[in-house]
Image (cartoon, rainbow, N blue to C red):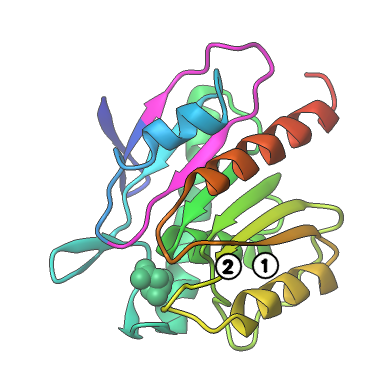
């Protein structure tokens, strides 16, 4: 069911497995709150799923922040939208009694998840960044000690050079995160390899989390 909270339209699915980590689903450009629900169910069976819709419209397509061109971000807008998304997550945790979630973001959603890790380090307890790019030219210097992050980039992704996600991995490591950066044989779209990597990563994070 679609609802609204802290300025976001979103969908929430209650978890069915005790202790399963909460997942924050962040769609790509042109997606919405329904897009990643099946992916969330596949990679995090039994987890609560929190899935907001990006507040920005680009030619009718929802996004999480504005861009000036493909791969060129409006960083002032990104900063403000990241604050708003952090507030939404905090409000949703209170509404549903959730632990800090693991973000599962694709493309534009992965980019705002990367921004959130560096701008609001305690809002997420980990992140799966599928086809992410460096969100800030000069990112905040927050410390995110041992926060687990999986970056899955596509070897044939036409949207970004291979150096870009590698630079994101380096920025997150410099801030203390534990980053697993995989380059999968794929373009910008997701493949079964991404699904398997994300599922294994989330299972591993859940296994290491302190018992609730
Ligand atoms: C972005 O704008 O966040 C990236 O270029 C990816 C996209 O959403 O197309």
> Would you say residue 68 sits in the magenta stretch?
no
**Image position of 102 (left or right of 106):** right
**Image position of 101 (left or right of 40):** right
Image-quadrant location for residue 189: bottom left
Q: Nearer the viewer, residue 79 or 65?
A: 65
> Would you say residue 14 sits in the magenta stretch?
yes
Q: Residues within 10 Å of mark 2 (few under 14, many from 20)?
A: many
* Residue at the image position 57 percent from the left and 28 percent from the top: 44
Image-quadrant location for residue 107: bottom left
Residue labelled 2 has its Cβ within 8 Å of some atom of ligand 1: no
- Residue marked by disc 1: 118
Q: Are marks 1 and 2 in contact (CB under 8 Å)?
A: yes
* Secondary structure of the residue carrying numbered label 2: helix
* Secondary structure of the residue carrying numbered label 1: helix
Task: Give the extent of the magenta segment.
Answer: 12-29
Screen quadrant of the C terminus: top right
**18 over 167 or under it: above or below:** above
Where residue 55 appears, as percent x and y from the top left, is 29, 59
Residue labelled 1 has its Cβ within 8 Å of some atom of ligand 1: no
- Could you say which disc has been placed on residue 208 in the image? none
**From this viewpoint, is residue 124 visible?**
no
* Residue at the image position 55 percent from the left and 36 percent from the top: 23
* Residue at the image position 80 percent from the left and 27 percent from the top: 207
Where residue 144 appears, as percent x and y from the top left, is 79, 60
- Residue marked by disc 2: 115
């Amino acid at each position: 069911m679609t609802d609204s909270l802290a300025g976001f339209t979103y969908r929430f699915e209650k978890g069915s497995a005790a202790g399963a980590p909460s997942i924050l689903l962040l769609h790509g450009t042109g997606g919405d709150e329904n897009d990643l629900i099946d992916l969330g169910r596949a990679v995090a069976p039994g987890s609560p799923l929190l899935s907001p819709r990006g507040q920005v419209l680009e030619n009718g397509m929802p996004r999480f922040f504005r861009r000036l061109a493909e791969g060129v971000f409006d960083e002032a807008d990104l900063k403000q939208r990241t604050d708003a998304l952090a507030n939404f997550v905090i409000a949703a945790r209170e509404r549903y009694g959730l632990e800090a979630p693991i973000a599962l973001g694709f493309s534009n959603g992965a980019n705002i998840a990367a921004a959130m890790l560096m701008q609001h380090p305690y809002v997420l307890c980990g992140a799966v960044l599928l086809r992410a790019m460096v969100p800030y030219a000069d990112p905040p210097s927050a410390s995110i000690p041992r926060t687990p992050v999986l970056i899955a980039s596509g070897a044939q992704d036409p949207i970004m050079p291979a150096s870009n996600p590698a630079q994101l991995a380096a920025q997150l490591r410099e801030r203390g995160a534990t980053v697993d950066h995989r380059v999968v044989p794929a373009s910008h779209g997701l493949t079964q390899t991404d699904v398997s990597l994300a599922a294994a990563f989330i299972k591993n994070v859940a296994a290491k989390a302190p018992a609730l």
